[in-house]
Amino acid sequence: MLSETLVILWVVFLFCCVITFIYEYFIPRAEKKKWDDKKPIEKDPNEIKKIITSKQEAFDSLAKENEIRKRKKKMEEVIRKHLENNPNNNKDLGIRLSSIEPTRENIESETQRIIREQDLEYLESLELDKMIEKEKELKKQREEQTKKERRDRIDNLRNNLKEEPANGIKILIKLPSGMSVQRKFLISEKIQDIVDYIDSKDELKVSYYLSTNYPKAVYKDLNQTLEESNITSPTTLYITEK
C-alpha cells in the first residue's frame, strides 16, 4: 500500500515537472517566435496622406460646427433674457421679439462671415505652400542646370586644350587657395588661352581677372596676345576676384 502511494506521488511529481517545464520553456519561445514572425505593416505614402487630409477636413468641419453651435446658443440666451424681462406684456413681447430677429440674423451672418474668412485663410495658406514648394523646385532646377553647364564647359575646355609648347615662356599662376600651377605658353597665344587653362583645373567658382605685382598690371582684355600684353618672359600671374 505504501509503495503504491509513493508511485502515485512520484508520477504526480513528474507530471508537475513536465507541466512546469513546458510552461517555463516552450510557451515563452512560442510567443517570441510569433512576435518575431510578425512583419511591420508598410503603408503607402499616398494612403497616409489621404488619411491625414481626411482627418484635417473632419477637424475643420467640427470646428465650424462648434462655432455655429456657440453662436446659436448665444442667440438663444439673448431671446431667453428678453422673455424673462417681459413675461406678461404680449404686445411688448411681440415688439421685443421683432427686435430680436435681426439680432439672430446678425449672429448667423457673423458666423458665416467667420467661416468664409477661415476658408479663405486656409486656401491662402495652401496657395502659399504651393508657391514655396514651386520656388524651391525651380531653384533646385536652376542650380542643377548651372552645375551641368559648368561641367560641360570644363569638359569642353579639357578636350580642346592646346598642347603645351616646348619653346614657350613659363607662366606661374598663383591660385587663391595658395596652390600654384605652371605651364608654358607661346607669346602669340592670348590671355584667353591662359584663362581656359585655369578654368580647366576646376579650382575656381568665381569671376576673376589676371594681374601681376611687378610691374603692376591688370589683364582684362582676353583677346590680347601675351606679346601685346608685354608678357614675353617668365611671369607670375595672380588671380583677383572681380
Image: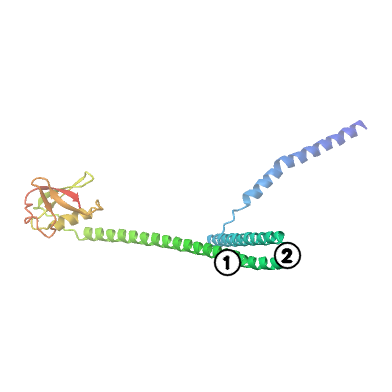
Looking at the picture, which amino acid does disc 1 mark? Ser
Q: Coloring scheme of the render?
A: rainbow
Q: Residues within 10 Å of mark 1 (few under 14, many from 20)?
A: few
Tell which of 166 and 71 is nearer to you.
71
Looking at the picture, which amino acid does disc 2 mark? Asn
Residue 191 seen in the figure = yes
Could you say whether the residue bearing mark 2 is in a helix, strand or loop?
A: loop
Tell which of 157 and 50 is nearer to you.
50
Q: CA distance from mark 2 to mark 1?
A: 30 Å
Q: Which of the labelled discs sits on residue 231, or is there none?
A: none
Residue 61: x %, y % from top left? 60, 62
> Which image quadrant for residue 161?
bottom left
**Residue under the point 72% across and 40% down:** 24
The label nearer to you, 2 versus 1, is: 2
Q: Where is mark 2, residue-wise?
A: 89
**Residue under the point 71% across and 44% down:** 27
Could you say whether the residue bearing mark 1 is in a helix, strand or loop?
A: helix
Residue lying farthest to the top in this orientation? 2
Residue 172: x %, y % from top left? 14, 47
Q: Name the side, left or right, on which 217 lies relative to 137.
A: left
Tell which of 76 and 185 is nearer to you.
76
Earlier-in-chain disc, 2 versus 1 = 2
- Which quarter of the rendered picture does the N terminus lie within? top right
User: How many numbered circles are shown?
Assistant: 2
> Which image quadrant for residue 186?
bottom left
In the image, residue 67 sits, relative to residue 214, either above or below, namely below
Residue 33: x %, y % from top left? 65, 48
Q: Name the side, left or right, on which 113 lies relative to 100.
A: left
Q: Residues within 10 Å of mark 2 (few under 14, many from 20)?
A: few
Q: Which of the labelled discs sits on residue 109, or is there none?
A: 1
Residue 11: x %, y % from top left? 83, 37
Asked if labels 1 and 2 touch by Cβ distance under 8 angstroms, the answer is no
